[in-house]
Amino acid sequence: MSGMLKITLVKSMIGRPEKHRNVLRGMGLTKLNRTVELQNTPSVRGMVEKVSHLVVAEEK
């Protein structure tokens, strides 16, 4: 499970539950179409799964 994940915010967080907003902020995604690279760890995978309808994740 080593490597990096490239995560892009593709849908707005407006009108979403506060839990989802907090997860996105925790990953560093604050604006639409912003991309971050994070380590591929179980905790990051869980965060991506929680907001999978708002982001696109690809392994790098």
Image (spheres, grey):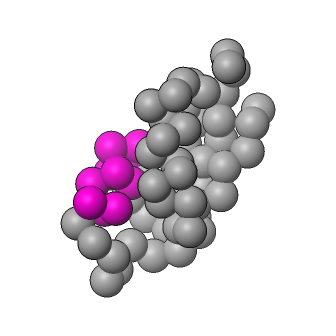
Residue 55 image position (x, y, % from top left): 57, 60
Magenta segment boundaries in residue numbering: 19-28
* Magenta span includes 9: no
Quarter location, residue 59: top right
Whether residue 50 is visible: yes
- The quarter of the rendered structure image containing the C terminus is top right
Please say if 31 is above or below 47: below
Asked if residue 18 lies left or right of residue 14, the reply is: left
For image coordinates 60% across by 48% down, the residue present is: 7
* Residue 33: image location, x then y, percent: 57, 64
Q: Quadrant location of residue 13?
A: bottom left
Q: On the rendered structure, is 51 left or right of 4?
A: left
Q: Residue at x 53, y 51 (%)?
A: 49
| Between 14 and 53, the one nearer to me in the picture | 53
The main secondary structure of the magenta stretch is helix
Residue 48: give x, y in percent of width and height.
52, 48
Q: Is residue 20 located in the magenta-colored stretch of the structure? A: yes
